[in-house]
Structure formats: C-alpha cells, structure tokens
Amino acid sequence: MVHDPAGLGFETRAIHAGQEPDPRTGSVIVPIYQTSTYAQDGVGGTREGDYEYSRTANPTRTALEEALAALEGARHTLAFGSGMAASDAVLRATLRPGDHLVLGNDVYGGTFRLIDKVLTQWGVTYSVAHLSDLDEVRAALRPETKLIWCESPTNPLLGVSDIPALAQIAHVGGARLVVDNTFATPYLQTPIELGADIVVHSTTKYLGGHSDVVGGAVVTNSDELREQLFFLRNASGAVPGAFDAWLTLRGLKTLAVRMERHCDNAERVVEALVRHPKVSRVYYPGLTEHPGHDVAAKQMRRFGGMVSFDHADGEQAALDAAARTRLFILAESLGGVESLIEHPGRMTHASVAGSLLQVPAELVRLSVGIEDARDLVADLEQALG
C-alpha cells in the first residue's frame, strides 16, 4: 500500500492508497476476499491482526478504508453496510439518554427519521437550526449538547455551512461537529481538515458512482472514537460485504474525473434552468446569488453535481416535469454516472412532511450525470415545456 500518501495528489491516492498489488499473485487490483472466516495459526493466532471473521474485518474492506482515509486526509475510516448504518453508529457512539444535538433545517430525510423516530425513544433530544446563521446555532446549543450534525451542501436545498466556524462553535460548547460529506465528496471538500470531528458518507452515491452498490463510511482522526465505532460495527454487524467494498473501491479510482464532469454538466444545466420561464428558483452553490456561494468558494474545490429548482407552476407541474424526462431517470438516490430526477417532497423527503424540515412542494432535485451536457439540457427543456 501507499504508506505515506500525504504528499501525493488526490488522483494518485485514489488509485494507490491501500491498493498495493497482491503479494502472492501480483494482482494489480485488490482481490475480493469472499470469505466468512480465516484459518488461525494456533488458537488466537490470527494473521495480520483482526482477520478472524469477516464481520470483524475483511482485507477488501480494509483496502477501501485505507483509501478513503487517505482521500479525506484522516487517520481512520470505517466502512458500513449503508450510509444510514454509518450515521446510526455515530449517533450511538457519541450520544446517551439525556443528550442533545443540533440538526440543520435541511437535513436528509432519512437522518431526520432516524433521530426523530428512533433516537428520541432513547431519551435523546434535538433542536433544528439554520446552520448558515451562526448566532442561531449558538443559541440552539445547551449544556447537554454533544453534536452538531451538518450537511454541506445540504440535501435537497443545497444549503452551505461554514464548516470551520461551526467546528469552533461546537468545540467551545463542548460538542463535536459531524459533517455529512456525501454531496461534496472528498474530491471537492475535506471537512476533517476544516475542523470537523467526524465525517459520514453514503458511499452508495458519488464514491461508488455507478448505482450498483449500497454502503456507508465514517471518517475521524480520533483513536478513541474509532475504537468505539469498530466495537459497535462488530457488535451490530452493520458491515459491507467484500464485493460491496470492492465495487466502492473501484468507484474511488475514477472519482476525480467523474466529479469534474458532474460539475461541468451541472453548470450547463444551471445556466439553462436560470433562464427558463417555468423555473422560479434554482438552488446551486455555484450561483453568485446563492447565499452560501462565498463560503462554498472558500471550502470547496468546485460546486458539485447536484441541482434543485422550484417549478413556477407549483407541485403538480413539478411532478409532471419529473415524469416527462427521457434521459433523467425518475428515481431516488444520486451520484451515479447516469442523471436522475426526483420530487423530494413525495420521495426522499416524505418523512419530513409536516415538520420544520418540510421541503417546498414545487421542488425538483437533479443528480446531474456525466452524459453529453447538450442532451441533458435538451431533455429538461422538453420536460418543462
């Protein structure tokens, strides 16, 4: 493996970190260790540390974890069976009954559902705040606050938070800052280097990149937290299989080139949407009028491949437009090479209906893929009419 990847470029780390050719066969690609258990050299004599049972550790998973840690500029990564499994482990490792956390007002619906419907039954409380308003965040903190949970950019309204400022507020208040970096990916943004304590990913999205695998990851510099998360993952069994880890590792190799194309295409789509008469508002951090544009420009390499917009004619028109696209596939999830379209209020964010996190009924979310940008623009224009 690349033992000291710190001085290497992102693309080099993505291809080489944790991925030295197999010492037995010379295989350039990390093998899929499709095994449940491992021979021991005498009772307790496990080879290379933790390899006794694949719920505990698996060499393919280890390679993925080393690669992702190198890309995030962190000491530790733990891979999970899904992004929600990763989020659940973080919440259970850092919170106890009576603790409190602060959520952004535009958090992913699945995260809100986990906290609002599950964690509250465990005695955890939460407050919702506009994380772009630092005074509002300070006011939301309590003596029992242990976490600030942030997405930047957010899903689906593409809000941007000042990660270094939030980290400072959290640390002054005796809390940790968690950043969901799924939308940005480590290619565009590295929250650990900006002061965050924990990064979570749905590796299902851009990191895997091909809509063929489900997974999650937690990244941290804390040795203590790594041990707590490792114990929880082993105890609960929320692990990805070897093939899932291998698919995600394969996706990482092309992350940089894919993200550049995603960003290029998103910018072309935004240009078309901004001037379209059926679009009343476009949500994209790359727009200079976006309220978080200046912050995003400071902490991100580019502005990403996710775009949302409000249909000027309301909810039914938004639903109709989402149903009329030919290249944009009507589907949940995001971050794959193919373009997707969805109606958050009826799909990914239905769980926040009626809450403080409810999204606009006329909102449409796009995951802009890597197809020919001219074709994507033409598809949206015919769908909008």
Image (cartoon, rainbow, N blue to C red):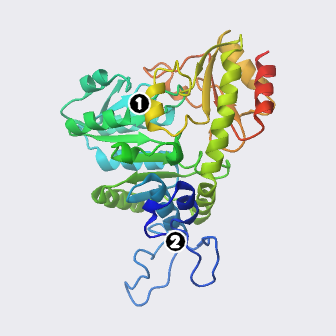
Residue identified by numbered label 2: 59
Q: Nearer the viewer, residue 55 or 268?
A: 268
Task: Where is residue 246? Give x, y as percent.
Answer: 60, 63
Mark number displayed over residue 339: none
CA gap between label 1 and label 2 equals 36 Å
| Residue furthest out toward the bottom | 42
The residue type indicated by label 2 comes to Pro
Tell me the residue at 71%/12% (across/down): 278
> Which corner quadrant of the image does residue 117 belong to?
top left
SS label for mark 1: loop
Left or right of 381, for residue 139: left
Q: Nearer the viewer, residue 182 or 235?
A: 182
Left or right of 220, for residue 155: right
Classed neighbour count for the residue bearing mark 2: other residues with Cα under 10 Å, few (<14), some (14–19), many (≥20): many
Tell me the residue at 64%/49% (across/down): 257
Can residue 367 be seen in the rendering of this structure? no
Residue identified by numbered label 1: 161
Task: Where is residue 81? Give x, y as percent.
Answer: 52, 54
Left or right of 300, for residue 379: right
Left or right of 289, for residue 274: right
Question: Relative to 365, does residue 217 appear above or below in the rendering?
Answer: below
Which of the two discs, 1 and 2, labels the residue nearer the N terminus? 2
Q: Nearer the viewer, residue 90 or 179?
A: 179
SS label for mark 2: helix
Question: Relative to 285, does residue 202 appear above or below in the rendering?
Answer: below
The residue type indicated by label 1 comes to Ser
Task: Where is residue 100? Give x, y as percent.
Answer: 27, 34
In the rendered image, the quadrant that contains the C terminus is: top right
Can residue 16 be seen in the rendering of this structure? yes
Task: Where is residue 20? Give x, y as percent.
Answer: 55, 73
Q: Nearer the viewer, mark 1 or mark 2?
A: 1
Classed neighbour count for the residue bearing mark 1: other residues with Cα under 10 Å, few (<14), some (14–19), many (≥20): many
